[in-house]
Image (cartoon, rainbow, N blue to C red):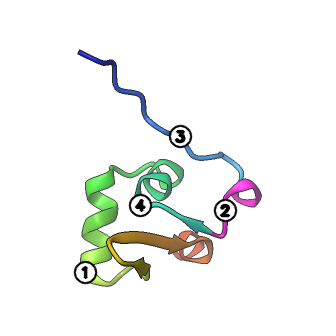
Amino acid sequence: MKPRFRRTAPTQFEKLPDLVTPEEAGAYLRLSKNAVYARLRDGSVDSIRFGRLIRIPKSELLKK
């Protein structure tokens, strides 16, 4: 069985890319991936969809 490694987000806001994945947003905000997806579903966090890919603008992280 392969060990699982979590991707961690940079701790400094300036080092984040302009669009982050839900996993990166969760790591930055110290929320679980499921908590981020719940906020995306209820509309409290805006996102951009590229087909099946979900990206969250960096500016949305400051609102929460």
User: Tag 4 or tag 1, which sits nearer the N-term?
Assistant: 4
Q: Please tell me whether mark 1 or mark 3 is closer to you in this view.
A: 3
Compute the Cα span from label 2 to label 4.
13 Å
Q: Of the residues shown, which amino acid type is indicated by label 4?
A: Pro
Do we see residue 37 in this rendering?
yes
Q: Which residue is mark 1?
A: 42
Do we see residue 64 in this rendering?
no
Circles 1 and 3 in contact, beta carbons < 8 Å:
no
What's drawn in magenta, residue-wise? Answer: 13-18
30 or 34: which is nearer to us? 34
Compute the Cα span from label 1 to label 3.
25 Å
User: Tag 4 or tag 2, which sits nearer the N-term?
Assistant: 2
Compute the Cα span from label 2 to label 1.
24 Å
| Mark 1 residue crowding within 10 angstroms, few (<14) / some (14–19) / many (20+) | few
Q: Residue at x 58, y 69 (%)?
A: 19
x and y, in percent, of residue 4 in the image:
34, 26
Compute the Cα span from label 3 to label 2.
13 Å
Q: Residue at x 54, y 52 (%)?
A: 28
User: Tag 3 or tag 1, which sits nearer the N-term?
Assistant: 3
x and y, in percent, of residue 56 in the image:
49, 72
**Tag 3, which secondary structure?**
loop
Q: Which residue is mark 2?
A: 17
Q: Of the residues shown, which amino acid type is indicated by label 1?
A: Asp
**Tag 1, which secondary structure?**
helix
Q: Which residue is mark 4?
A: 22
User: Tag 4 or tag 3, which sits nearer the N-term?
Assistant: 3
Q: Which residue is mark 3?
A: 8
| Residue 14 lies in the magenta stretch | yes
